[in-house]
Image (cartoon, coloured by chain):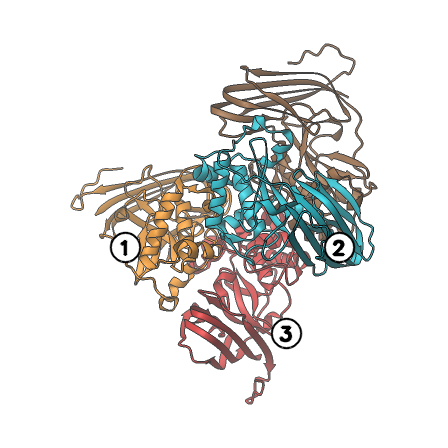
Chain colours: A brown, B cyan, C red, D orange
């Protein structure tokens, strides 16, 4: 499947401010960047850094800044998590997967060991992950205005409501508490309504990471990865060292014919 | 300086349990492992994995387990953090340093942005770090029994008391909130009384990591690194997937003549 | 039913300390104190104060103190909460019942408005209270060692385990969040095993308070009230202004023949 | 001093909702209500209930509601807290003062015992209260937008910023942690800019309650009490059982000549 992803992010900084942006499509297996353009207006001196397979833009900025990104991406078919995927023993996990077993700022999985054992303890692997996702969709309402940038999975567990970031944090927390490595992924998402940067998760089962959207709002086959990390703190599309003016942001993801050479969407 | 570090960790697992141990000295710059022995009694099948410069032992264990470790280590002289070390712009930090700017499970630095600006905002770099350490030593009491395995830096800020782990978490939190990368380090520490696995921290200033002990209990020149991570969740000497019996642990660190061939301590 | 309740509380204070004790049976409707004795050894000057229907002992103490209390109490039959008890509109509640609608230290009911509506929102009055109690007994394990003196209902909701105090706090929280006044009660409890001061709750339904034991460990007919309050902070059997030595405490509750003049239990 | 206090509170309820309002001046010592009018538009059936010296309006409402209140109040001169006021032993406190020693929803004083001892432990009584108020004014910034309706004193202690409610909660918390009964008071306040319902506190010293404004924004001599309670949960000017539309509120407090018969302010 070929997708055209586009984003515009604009803000203003009254004083010189360190800015980090993650809006570019990751250079990751299963997604091929056919072409892309990044425009920063007016000119700011932003450096590109690779972090795992993600790409970070950063620099000292002041005044207005608008970042327009556009990429044509071919996605390979993606298999969905299924019940018979095996949960690996800790001893069999690759070293770089281990950090995703640990609690993080918004995913205090150490507090959920008892709950995970009580609720999902008879299950393992893919079956356990699917049960956690089912639980989330049955017990948590997708709702704006309940959570904010400090909301942890513990709070969402009480509120029973939140947005994609909150579903992802609680899903990750329950997986880690159940012994399954899990991490947060920032993505462009086809058919997400309204369009936005999407926070999803992936779990390590069998011999690899499996991507899933705990909200169920976007099909897994249309997810384009930007970056991954322990939780939202690692994968924000924008982080700044000081106050930013209002952030105006638009995102769009369009499926295009893979043979079509002439994209005209702007 | 040549140090003989030794540790014994013993526990018991009623059921088969995934176990991860970090007791071996890190293969890190500034410390040379002259010789070392690791004995696991009775035999358990533990695999060694390298994580950054740390070394992780892991495996599925059941019944009694005792791990005895002994290493002779040469430490290069270590310069202490000083006030004129420069704080780097985010844009100038190596990519692998960036995660240590972010909040983590026990170091919710995002909640301390205002406090760090209010208290230490006029300072920068080494001077800021030294002011944070001074603040910790003046405002937090070293005291057992106040904190536990779930205590965050936010709670220690209220309690104003804790052990090495808590000093480290609050020190890291205030540094990150002040824009300075900081991470937790597990170490063997010369002259720590009573001897124990020690939790310390390091900050990125100038062009490197600078080790320091926020409690002031152990001299920096006698710290032998085991592992580092975002906070205590990453560097525990023992992590298990299920309940462990009482953990009996002894640690000793002795300075020995570097020319001395015959170590007799056991 | 006639009950003989007895308690011994002993501790030690190195320095002069303000002490408050609530061990005496309340002078409350439905329970008649036939006889009682209170012995403080060695002599300390403790004053008795009535707080609602509870009785508080307080004074400045130092050194050893042992308080032995013994009372013979006749309990009137007590009707259990039943499903068809009406939930009153706020406007119809007596003024002194209103504070028990509000969140308190250990019962942050304001955080549970959404959960209470989601889980119990179709129910009202006695039926809602019974559903909450059923939920507690199905979803929370009675277990020592999980909670401590700072554990809130929010934490118990995550832990899904606790002791009588925790069941009571979560029960109160869910009732208040569902619009039903609820408060904590300290009591002597017949058939509680092991015997202890018991924390239970009561809810305002119809035209009065209804006592219930959310743990289900003690029959309602055998509960002897000591005091009530917003939560455990108000009804501790012992509160002191400074550190107490180890507290040794024994409680016993025995059913005796109501005609029996000669009690021989000590 | 004679004050004319006025408030208008308007909102809308889509569904029948239980409403409680506290806008009327308390019938308390030191303040004499010369005249007052309360107008509810359109007519709703609101009942008046006395709670301590406060007056609560409550009823089931639906649709628009506007409550206009106007009172002419004579205030007796009020002495400010001074350093030599004695702190009473717990044993010497009136029974109805004791609850204000206990932690409450927004004032978790039990967590601040160590801090209060460390920071203010050498002081007592009025001197301690004045030191706490000085500390608040030096260490906490008056700032809108940092706190919300769930903000506790613990969070304000970290944020070091908040509004009158937050200053009051942290002030109460530190006083209680220091052994001094303290409670929250809702008031009309002369010279508060911008005018608003004001949250202040009072402490029990010597033989009575002493009113003070921890923000320092309003003179104590011009405070007109509405209600008191353990914290903001008890003294909100409006509490409703369900969602309210936007609340439009205006408050004004004007000093008028005490001999002046003809008030013309509207």
Q: Quadrant where the N terminus of chain C lies?
A: bottom right
Q: Residues within 10 Å of mark 3 (few under 14, many from 20)?
A: some
Residue linked to disc 3: C191
Instruction: Identify the secondary structure beneath mark 1.
Output: loop
Q: Does A179 sit above or below residue A71?
A: below
Q: Residue furthest left?
A: D259
Task: In the rendered structure, find residue D82 and report the number of the disc placed on it.
Answer: 1
Q: CA distance from mark 3 to mark 2?
A: 48 Å
Q: CA distance from mark 1 to mark 2?
A: 63 Å
**Subunit under mark 3:** C
Are labels 3 and 2 on one chain?
no
Instruction: Identify the secondary structure beneath mark 2.
Output: strand
Whether the residues at callouts 3 and 1 have beta carbons within 8 Å, the answer is no
**In the image shown, does C104 or C201 lie closer to the viewer?**
C104
Residue C179 at x, y percent in the picture? 53, 52
Q: Residue at x 64, y 14 (%)?
A: A266
Residue linked to disc 2: B67
Any part of residue C16 in sight? yes
Instruction: Select label 1 or label 2 by which is in front.
Output: 2
Relative to A146, is D60 on the left or the right?
A: left
Residue A165 at x, y percent in the picture? 63, 36
Residue C193 at x, y percent in the picture? 65, 72
Relative to D115, is B27 on the left or the right?
A: right
Instruction: Select label 3 or label 2 by which is in front.
Output: 2
Residue B22 at x, y percent in the picture? 71, 48
Q: Residues within 10 Å of mark 1 (few under 14, many from 20)?
A: some
Q: Quadrant of residue A213?
A: top right
Relative to D130, is C197 on the left or the right?
A: right
**Subunit under mark 1:** D
**In the image shown, does D149 or B157 lie closer to the viewer?**
B157
């Amino acid at each position: 499947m070929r997708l055209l992803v586009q984003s515009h992010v604009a803000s203003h900084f009254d004083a010189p401010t360190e800015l980090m942006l993650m809006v570019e499509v990751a250079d990751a297996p299963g997604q091929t960047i056919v072409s892309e353009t990044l425009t920063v207006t007016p000119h700011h001196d932003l450096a590109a850094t690779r972090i795992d397979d993600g790409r970070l833009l950063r620099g000292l900025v002041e005044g207005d800044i608008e970042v327009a990104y556009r990429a044509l991406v071919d996605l390979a078919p993606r298999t969905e998590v299924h019940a018979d995927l095996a949960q690996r023993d800790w001893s069999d996990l690759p070293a770089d997967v281990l950090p995703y077993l640990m609690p993080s700022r918004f995913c205090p999985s150490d507090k959920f060991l008892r709950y995970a054992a009580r609720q999902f303890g008879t299950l393992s692997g893919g079956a356990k992950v699917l049960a956690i996702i089912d639980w989330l969709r049955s017990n948590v309402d997708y709702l704006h205005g309940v959570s904010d940038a400090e909301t942890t999975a513990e709070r969402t567990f009480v509120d029973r409501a939140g947005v994609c970031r909150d579903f992802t944090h609680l899903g990750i927390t329950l997986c880690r508490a159940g012994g399954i490595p899990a991490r947060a992924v920032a993505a462009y998402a086809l058919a997400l309504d309204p369009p936005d940067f999407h926070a999803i998760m992936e779990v390590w089962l069998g011999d690899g990471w499996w991507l899933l959207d705990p909200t169920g709002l976007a099909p897994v086959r249309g997810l384009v990865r930007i970056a991954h990390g322990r939780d939202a703190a690692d994968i924000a599309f924008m982080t700044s060292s000081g106050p930013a003016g209002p952030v105006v942001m638009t995102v769009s993801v369009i499926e295009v014919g893979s043979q079509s050479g002439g994209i005209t969407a702007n």
